[in-house]
Image: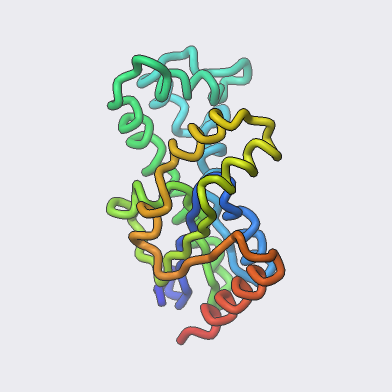
Amino acid sequence: MQGIGGVSCMRIALTGGIAAGKSTVAARMAQDGADVIDYDFLAHILQEPCSPAINPLVGAFGPGILDERGGVDRRALAERVFGEGVPQSAVATLNGIMHPQIYELARNRERRIVGDGRKHVIVHDIPLLGEVMESIPFAFDAVACVVVPEDVRVRRLVDTRGMSVEEARVRVREQGDDASRLRYANVVIDATQPLEQMFDYVDTLVEEWFDEE
């Protein structure tokens, strides 16, 4: 149990690799009454024109990362961070700019959520939790990891996003393996089971978190 703004709440971390079904789980948790903070969405906010991240990003990666609106062209930024021949330090530079601002946005959202004085279950939806767990400035009451075998995730990307098998494998492996995520997890959500069965399990989890004293 966490004290957030003087209110007792459950703070949960939710993670899982691309095409694992994490977004489906997060949506179900929201339907069950949890407040979900989507870190991908926060990152997109910070890449919009006039966000406080724009000037540091341009300073680090050049004005060529901007689109015609003055926001970040994500493809151009990716080329300067992950492209062939780019030093590995570029990833650390990007994370050093983005992560503190994402955390501040998440903290502000928590403050708004607890403004009604009621107990909340607040879910931080963090795709690459395994990479930031040692540095993220939040303590979690539970860490839930959505898991699916790699071949299933590859097939989902091929079927739903039109990727080739090789492109899909690269995307899956870019995000690390489940072992790095499971190292911190104390709740495992198997997204290969029938949807209703998975939803029943998620419903039970959220209910237990609300009942936690």
Residue 78 % position (x, y) = 47, 24
Where, quadrant-wise, is the N terminus in this rendering? bottom left
Residue 165 % position (x, y) = 58, 32
| Placement of 86 over or under 5, stated as above or below | above
Work out whether residue 172 or residue 113 is closer to the camera in this orientation and state it.
Answer: 172
Residue 96 % position (x, y) = 33, 36
175 relative to 25 in the view: left or right: left
Work out whether residue 164 or residue 175 is closer to the camera in this orientation and state it.
Answer: 164
Q: Is residue 112 visible?
A: yes
| Number of numbered discs on residues | 0
Tell me how the rendering is colored: rainbow
- The residue depicted at 47 percent of the width and 64 percent of the height is 144
- The residue depicted at 45 percent of the width and 77 percent of the height is 8
Where, quadrant-wise, is the C terminus in this rendering? bottom left
Task: Place residue 37 in its image quadrant.
Answer: bottom right
- The residue depicted at 53 percent of the width and 31 percent of the height is 47
150 relative to 90 in the view: left or right: right
Q: Is residue 41 visible?
A: no
Task: Place residue 160 in its image quadrant.
Answer: top right
| Placement of 115 over or under 45, stated as above or below | below
Residue 7 % position (x, y) = 46, 75
Work out whether residue 178 or residue 41 is closer to the camera in this orientation and state it.
Answer: 178
Work out whether residue 164 or residue 203 is closer to the camera in this orientation and state it.
Answer: 164
- The residue depicted at 44 percent of the width and 45 percent of the height is 102
